[in-house]
Image (tube, rainbow, N blue to C red):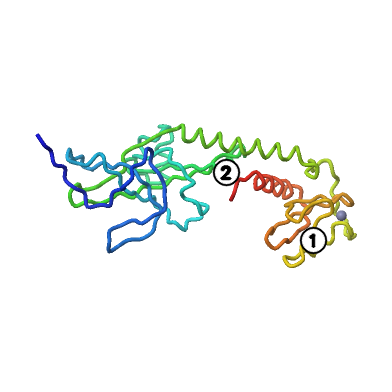
Amino acid sequence: METLKKTVSHQTAAVPVDVPTISIGEIGSDEDKRTAVRIQWFGRSDPSDKDFPDEAQFFFEPTLSTESKRWYGKPDAFKIVFIGPVRDWPKKEVAQQVADTVTEGNLDADVVWMVSSRFPENHPRNGDLIPSSMMTPAVILGDPLFGIIRPKPYCDMQVLEAELTEVRKKVDLAEQLLQNRDMELPPEAFPWNKSRTKCMTCWPLSQSTSQNPTIPVGGTRDDRTYICSGCHRRWWQYNAESHHWRNVTDKDEWDEVRKQSILLDAGFHE
Ligand SMILES: [Zn+2]
């Protein structure tokens, strides 16, 4: 007996994906097309309908717009760990907390959890670098035939593990680079110089401009940090395009600057 499935009115993907996948593309019907961040994945109808086309993949929208800073300008660098009702959150004990934060307490609403090793963040408690992580509600699709189309639930904690491994690899690489760099000795190796006396070795850095960049003694024009061998002052090229340098006199700021520049050199950001 031949069964004829009903067709959905929503745009379906021409090329299927193996895991829920984030991309930027067109979304909506012909009259109402716009560019958005979209998640391509299978759907399910609510209430469930045996005629629902299980093989079709739809474009669901997270509630963050393309302009949101939280994407770091690269939504497609994020990978999906979990998609589904909050009550099925991988760690049951925090499900309610997630619901309170993301879906106004509703455990039945769909939530998306995305991570990216491309943009590491500091762990809120121990400060270790970890993949950036976001949770947003998933926008459901209203359908004249099937009522509501929701994304099919998905969970793969290996995605998180893989992104964590990726961050650790980059941190290891950054530490190696640091060890191999003669100029980048640990700050403890140098006393801080806060004297007001101008040092003629490093003072020209403060006069550096895009038209006439100053090259630090023993360094290159593109170095991000520089420690003066004459007076031990620390310098930071805070604007690498305009070649502007600034003297850093605060140890915490220096540690942060140094860490950031090493991560940049290790290829963290494009
Ligand atoms: Zn100096």
For residue 237, the mark is none
Q: Is residue 40 left or right of residue 243?
A: left
- At mark 1, the secondary structure is loop
Give the residue at mark 2: 120
How far across and down, in percent of the image, does residue 254 sit? Answer: 74, 49
* Callout 1 amino acid: Thr
Q: Looking at the image, is mark 2 or mark 1 earlier in the sequence?
A: 2
Give the residue at mark 1: 214
Q: Is residue 32 left or right of residue 168?
A: left
- At mark 2, the secondary structure is strand
How far across and down, in percent of the image, does residue 112 sit? Answer: 40, 43
Crowd around label 2: few <14 · some 14–19 · many ≥20 (10 Å) = many
Q: CA distance from mark 2 to mark 1?
A: 32 Å
* Callout 2 amino acid: Pro
Q: Quadrant of ligand 1?
A: bottom right
What residue is shown at x 36% (from left), y 36% (from top)?
Answer: 154
